[in-house]
Amino acid sequence: MMRLGLVFAGLLMAALPARAEPVTTFTLDNGMDVVVIEDHRAPVVVHMVWYRVGAADEPTGKSGIAHLFEHLMFKGTEKYSGEEFDQMIELNGGSDNAFTSLDYTGYFQRIAADRLELMMKLEADRMTGLILTEDQVVTERDVVLEERNERTDSDPGSLFGEQRNAAQYMNHPYAIPIIGWRHEIETLDLGDALSFYRTYYAPNNAILVVAGDVDPEEVRTLAETHYGPLEPSDLPPRIRPAEPPHLAERRLTFYDTRVAQPYVIRSYLAPERDPGNQSEAAALTYLADLLGGSGATSLMGERLQFDTQIAVYSTAFYRGMSVDDTTFGLLVVPSPGVTLPEAEAAMDDVIAEFLETGVDMEKFESLKMQLRASEIYARDSVQGLARRYGAALASGFSVEDVQSWPEVLQAVTPDDIMDAARNLFDKRRAVTGYLMKEEEPTQ
Amino acid sequence: MIRLLLGLLTALTLTAPARALDIKEITSPGGIDAWLVEAHDIPFTALEIRFKGGASLDPADKRGATNLMMGLLEEGAADRDARAFARDRDALAATYGFSASTDSLSVSARFLTENRDEAVELLRDALIAPRFDEDAIERVRQQVLASIRSDYKDPNTIAAQTFMTLAYGDHPYGSSMDGTEDSVATITRDDLIAAKAATMALDRVYVSAVGDITAEELGALLDRLLGDLPANGAPQAETATYLLSGGTTVTDFASPQSVAIFGHEGIARHDPDFFPAFVLSEVLGGGGYSSRLMEEVREKRGLTYGVYSYLAPRLLGALVMGQVASSNNRVAEAMDVIRAEWRRMAEEGLSEEELTAVKTYLTGAYPLRFDGNANIAGIMVGMQYQGLGTDYIDTRNDKVNAVTVEDIKRVAKRILLPDELHFVVVGQPEGLEVAN
């Protein structure tokens, strides 16, 4: 038996004409949450299973296990070998992949809508039925080390990002890169993988998102058949070490011979979207756009790229979807001949000017319009919508939080933005980094 | 293997899209052809415009002119300077994308039904009356130069560019369409005007639209949007001659990992053997399929995070290409495995079972592409650019299914040339025999 939850189809349509995707949610008896998003424009379905476990939930000293384990989920079960798993999907024209973030891990397939049941069969099977050998773990660990080589160690910008992040978080595991520190990846073994699997892979730690040309009632029946029999497990509480007060500004400089374009980047510790309370995060979303959204209309872009030619590029960024404290960032890539301290000073001038003069009303109205339109455009990608719900639910948010977010954004006032900005811009909570060219020694 | 067999049987029943796309071929009152799919469930339209030719039409001493020109279309047009243009675009919540490639220019637009006329009017200014203000030129030039300097330090770009230069020499395919620091520095406003006149003309334009718009509305829109473009552009560039032979070229780059780009001459899109070539290439190194290269290099040996190979049939010359990245002390082994797989496919082709499996994958995956207005608009403009008809969507899977084991064997021998494979390796590879 399933407890049928609220059916959200069209519930808020009158209040918010931008949203029309029909969404149905319910929870299986074993605790697995289910979200069904209907889009009947094409005979395609996206089937996703999200686990409420990410890199920030790893045991101390085992960084990278969440991501390595995501790779290992493709190695096969008693019923289907890894090769058969791939073949079953490919023989049906489907494609599949997976991803690991700080807060969640997800697996998904895109396939013809009438093949949904097969996907559920495969995904339910590997939720608890995975079989691993030491050899498989060792070979896949090599693949992950090559992935780290490719994505991080070959890219000074990524290495710099790891160092800045480690300085940003003094106690919280967001300090550790998702892929893991190399010296810790190198020691991960079969025991680590199995212990991680047994702890976190269970229906009561999972969210099923099915999006596309499907009937919610049919999805319910299929989910009950395939995921329903899986036993829930005792999950450890999701409590992570919190940040202590940040009392001292942090600054760092990273030199690398491979740097082509120096830049200055600063991140401030910032509040994330909280379940049931998303208004400060909504204000910060506007703030990022007002300061560093489009180059020709944001305050940083106008001051540094148009009124002066201090920068070739500038931007601001904020990602509110997070379990714990997130960051708000500013980046300036200086023009040739402009030093990083000069670029940083110009960036600080823009912040000071904004705090003094406040929100430009014309830009504010334009942003409101763009955020409303982005909800219309978002409906064109059912996979994007599926990710939105999956990421939110895996990060502890409710379906109501997801659905009210556009309204929360529309309700933001200029005063909210200024309050959020004044709370944010405290250098004691910031990390300022310079990425610089290391000149190669002359031989 | 009963499970697999069942999977196969059900898969074979998979056919073309359950709801076939209703593509309308329209001609505007002014004579501009376009493909349209009406989709009124979401109140916006995705519009794709493509011009054949692109950055290959740069004058030899002005490499980068077309790319810089495309970067400036949104930086001031008609009576608006760059900031006024951006302000009005943002207020309409329209998005415009302008990008150059070697063989074409792309304009992608997305606009709401509620302010469609204004959004089209603004886009028209960018396409018909860009200002190319001197301050905007300098600003965008600096951005392009920053990107060129970054490319000089990026192992993937260094490898790809080195390969293309060795393969095509002085032909435009042999150099980066971004230009060099030196060439970009010399581009003038007149060069940008000339680049636009050469590349953006009605004799080479393809259009598709998907969304909340009728055929009549689209016809009027296109006449307004594109009608004032010149009738003719510059003659297309000449065919590129492939200059490279088998071997290995190493470019020293301080990094823990080596990047290798490899390939040799390929097969044209219109070649009668293209479909067998496409099918076998998917098995060899396709991205969406458990390819032989991924199986041998990554799954079995853990030598890389990713290895791919693919057909690259460009307008003026075709390649078969591939890419791998592996630790400096393991890249030689990865390259040996790739060569061996290249040779095995060339000599043995595919078994009946392998061919059936990949056909089932390709034919099953095809209808899944037609998902979302923006996706469909992109696919449709690509089809027109390739010279395919709207009926191609219904016949494409038949062409895949018609490929036989004998076709594969013959074509594999023809298009996969293990002795011709040239590897460009960027990094500090160990134990590599370098021979050109």
Image (spheres, rainbow, N blue to C red):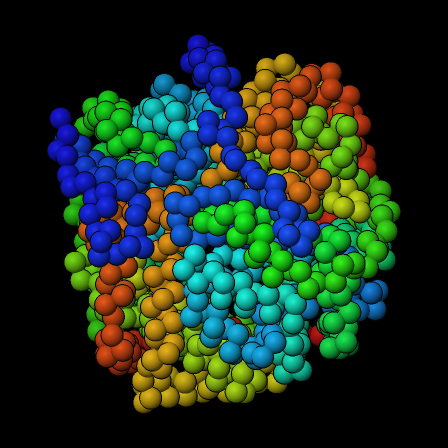
- Comparing B27 with B210, the one in front is B27
Residue farthest along the top direction in this orientation: B2
| Residue at (55, 22) in percent of width and height | B360
Res A358 visible: yes
- Give A129 or A287, whichever is nearer the viewer: A287
Residue closest to the eye, B426 or A122: A122
Q: Residue at x 51, y 34 (%)?
A: B21
Q: Is residue B146 left or right of residue B421?
A: left
Total numbered labels placed on residues in the image: 0
Compared across the picture, whether A27 is left or right of A106 comes to left
Q: Position of residue A35 (x, y in %)?
A: 26, 39
Which image quadrant is residue A377 in?
Answer: bottom left
Q: Give A402 or B343, whichever is nearer the viewer.
A: A402
Q: Is residue A435 above or below residue B365?
A: below
Query: In the displayed structure, would residue A48 be above or below residue A285?
Result: above
Residue at point 76%, 35% (across, down): B270
In the rendered structure, the answer to whether residue B120 lies left or right of residue B60 reads left
Residue in view at x 66 percent, y 19 percent: B402
Residue B195 drawn at (x, y percent): 75, 66
Can residue B322 be seen?
A: no
State the image quarter where residue A121 is shown.
top left
Q: Is residue A147 above or below residue B21?
A: below
Residue B25 x %, y % = 61, 41
Percent x, y of residue B272: 77, 28
